[in-house]
């Protein structure tokens, strides 16, 4: 039976996950520089290992209050650019059997919630309790237009205009 690895993280009191194959690294928050006129879910940019990377706020996307004192960044790549996804705390990496991965119900999957990928049944290492967690699809967090806006804003920021 096939196994998929997921990274599990907190946003406020809720647990979410992403496929580990989409994550290039985990970083603690850097100084985030705001970018004017960017999409609402972009918190700003960071300078990481000689690259300028936009910081995406899942809390803004979900309409959650942004209260966490310390956060972590999941570094990923999508649409030809690196993206840092801000989360409260990374809880761990979990192996999930194929039979424990279910599609998001059609009634929940709309154009506005296209970033919802799967419903995953998992057991976290610190507890022996099974939980159901929503998996987020990195590639559909924003529309192609929004990804283009970010690229344009980054190019302007890098060229100093």
Image (spheres, rainbow, N blue to C red):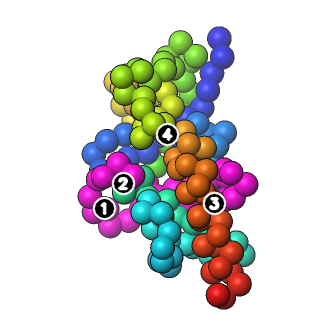
Q: Position of residue 91 (x, y in %)?
A: 44, 44
Given residues 64 and 123, the one toward you in this image is 64
Q: Secondary structure at mark 2?
A: helix
Residue at far front of view: 145
Per the image, the residue denoted by label 1 is 66
Find out whether residue 17 is within the magenta segment. Answer: no
Q: Residue at x 59, y 55 (%)?
A: 145
Above or below, comparing residue 102 to residue 133 in the picture: above
Q: Which mark is residue 115?
A: 4
Name the residue that disc number 2 marks: 59
Disc 3 from disc 2: Cα separation = 21 Å
From this viewpoint, is residue 5 visible?
yes
Q: Give the CA distance from mark 2 to mark 1.
A: 6 Å
Secondary element at tag 4? loop
Residue contact between numbered discs 3 and 2, judged by CB atoms under 8 Å: no
The C terminus: image quadrant: bottom right
Label pair 4/2, CB-CB below 8 angstroms = no
| Viewer-nearest residue: 136 or 28 | 136
Determine which residue is flagged by label 3: 148
Whether pointer 2 and pointer 1 mark residues with C-beta atoms closer than 8 Å, the reply is: yes
Residue 150: x and y in percent read: 59, 65
């Amino acid at each position: 039976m096939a196994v998929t690895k997921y990274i599990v993280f907190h946003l406020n009191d809720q647990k979410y996950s992403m496929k580990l194959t989409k994550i290039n690294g985990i970083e603690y928050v850097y100084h985030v520089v705001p970018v004017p006129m960017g999409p609402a879910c972009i918190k700003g940019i960071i300078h990481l290992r000689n690259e300028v990377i936009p910081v995406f706020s899942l809390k803004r996307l979900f309409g959650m209050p942004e209260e966490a004192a310390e956060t972590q960044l999941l570094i990923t790549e999508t649409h030809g650019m690196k993206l840092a996804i801000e989360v409260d705390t990374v809880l761990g990496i979990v192996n999930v059997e194929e039979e424990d991965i279910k599609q998001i119900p059609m009634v929940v999957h709309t154009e506005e919630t296209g970033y919802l990928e799967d419903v995953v049944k998992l057991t976290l290492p610190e507890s022996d309790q099974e939980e159901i967690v929503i998996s987020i699809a990195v590639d559909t967090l924003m529309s192609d237009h929004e990804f283009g806006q970010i690229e344009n804003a980054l190019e302007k920021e890098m060229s100093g205009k």
